[in-house]
Image (cartoon, helix red, strand yellow):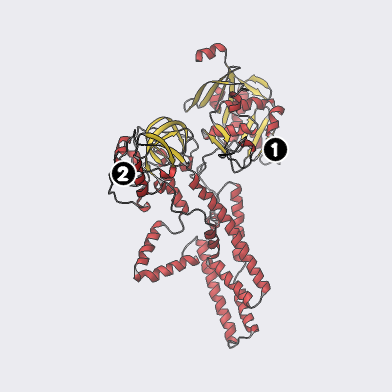
Amino acid sequence: MGTGTSQTPSVTLLDHVSGQSNRPLSRPAHSLTSEHVLRELRSDAVRGLEADEAARRVAELGPNELDGDKGVQPLAVFLEQIFNAMTLVLLLALAASFGIQAWIEGGILAGIIVLNVFIGFAQTLHAEKTIDSLRTLGSPTCSVVRGGDTVKIRTADVVPGDIVDLSTGDSVPADIRLVEAVNLEADEALLTGESAPVSKSPRPTFDDDTGPGDRLNVVYSSTIITKGRGRGVVFATGMFTEIGLIARALHRGDGSEDDKEERKTAVSSLGRCGRAAVAWLGRFLGLTAGTPLQRKLSQLFLGLFSFAVVCAVVVLGTNKFDARQDVVLYAVTTAIGTIPVSLLLVLTVTMAAGTKKMVERHVIVRNLQSLEALGGVTNICSDKTGTITQGRMVVRRAWLPGCGTFSVDTGNDVYDPTAGRVSFSSSQPKDAEQSQDQQETPPAVVSPLDEPTAKPALWWYLNVASLANLATLERTRDEGDEGDAAEKPGKRWTARGAPTEIAIEVFAARFGWNRVQLCEGRDAKWRHVAEFPFDSDVKMMSVLFRETASQETHGAVERVLDSCGRIAVNEAVTGLTASIRADVLANMEALAGQGLRVLALAHGVAAAADLCASD
């Protein structure tokens, strides 16, 4: 640890390389040992940074925030809808119509312009707000070591060299090179799109060009610790983090950072001012910026506007530029008639309709014009997960053998067990797949809280879903509120744990089941005895509860079936025969064919002697 002033030259975002620090290290942090990283950052794994040194680094390197963008600015979004060649030409036509008192034609033009601007503004603003939510992914506070003491500080005050303590449920405040870790796993779906948590270890080092998803000795800003604990040294903050690189790409305009630098250089030279002005005008009118379709439409409208002016001049010229009202009216009408005033509205409505369809499939359309490239696309081959994702999962189907299938249609908040609707069908998943070409009766919407009483098979299903689960789900309460937060509107549901287990816990909560209520408190019916976390070899996790000495498990369908000798079919328990096993696997394949991750739930009763032996 040191407090001397470094003379390392400042580095801009243009020079930044993935995996490096705000001030570059000799090699990327994942390629160096933790001791080497600590030495280069002049920090200490036990004492951390001194308070005055941390303050100096904040002043020198800036706060740990995703800067470079002022957030969503409705006025700027609104002006973007107006300041383009197509809308400006229509505004000129509108002014000309009102100038000659052609109120009907002017009113139609005004309606077209307002409708076009409103549709574009509403869609773009909604998408920008969704993208801007990236800025709020990090936790507002974190635990760091300052002068040998562990203190809570604002995430914005974290600097390279800070020693950060991490535990289950924490949001990582910056890019951190691990120094120590115990069973540490992180959810990196935000960066890599992979739903399964990634095991982390401080010991290995990796090649310089190793991708972010394979740097197992690093945890990234805004990712979530789903298991274990650890400690590490911060090497990158703010826009120099991996999430900062994504934020920079999302908030960047049509021109790249290199273009901005070139424009600054051009403006600084008097000999290039004219070229810079022409380039700015071209971008302003949409002639040199935007998508190919936007540029072509801008050129078309400017060409038609020039032609309209020529037509007006010709009409006035043939009348010897007589300023009589009827001559001016005829000239302006001729000019306006050459402009396809409805083309822009038709284009916007068409794009908005496409956007609506994509939103129904949970796709964020940030810019209406981005859809034009999809017009000729027939097939898209992509990974099942996205690179920019919430990293959250939801139970979509739940099949109970001999009973039927529950389907879940969630709202925007997948952690909210009261959002969306639950429907039930007596058919099996494989039956629905085989009857795709036939007219099928849609599943009936049900009230989840009434279902366990009506369907006894669901009772044990929910018990296993809640008990064989290490996730927690709760509704947050603002500071100063009194009473039960769950009964107050406007509160936010939060969850901790692995994404798969959170999804199962939310599903059980829809029916009124809760792990905490089942095994804690005065009315608890179960006492937790032991747990066996998910293992990639056995592909199952199991928990042991005492009362009826029951053991609950969930995991891969094939592995769970191998561990079972009986199966519950509706209210009856029967032997797991080869034909029943084949039927279960066929339903599993049907669900997997829908792009769903499929798990099986099971429970068993352990004898007292076996329970003592396991203890």
**Where does residue 361 sit, x and y in percent of width and height?**
59, 46
Of marks 2 and 1, the one in the foreground:
2
**Which circle marks residue 36 in the picture?**
none
Question: As displayed, is residue 88 above or below residue 253?
Answer: below
Q: Which kind of residue does numbered mark 1 sit on?
A: Pro
- Give neighbour class at mark 2: few <14, some 14-19, many 20+ (Cα, 10 Å): some
- What residue is pinned by disc 1? 443
Secondary structure at badge 1 equals: loop
Instruction: Give the side of residue 326 with respect to residue 309, left or right.
Output: right
Residue found at the very far top of the displayed protein: 609
The mark nearer the N terminus, 2 or 1, is 2
Q: Nearer the viewer, residue 449 or 578?
A: 449
Looking at the image, can residue 576 be seen?
Answer: no
- What residue is pinned by disc 2? 25
Residue depicted at 55% across the width and 67% down the height: 86
Residue depicted at 35% across the width and 63% down the height: 265
- Give neighbour class at mark 1: few <14, some 14-19, many 20+ (Cα, 10 Å): some
Instruction: Give the side of residue 58 with respect to residue 516, left or right.
Output: left
Q: Which kind of residue does numbered mark 2 sit on?
A: Leu
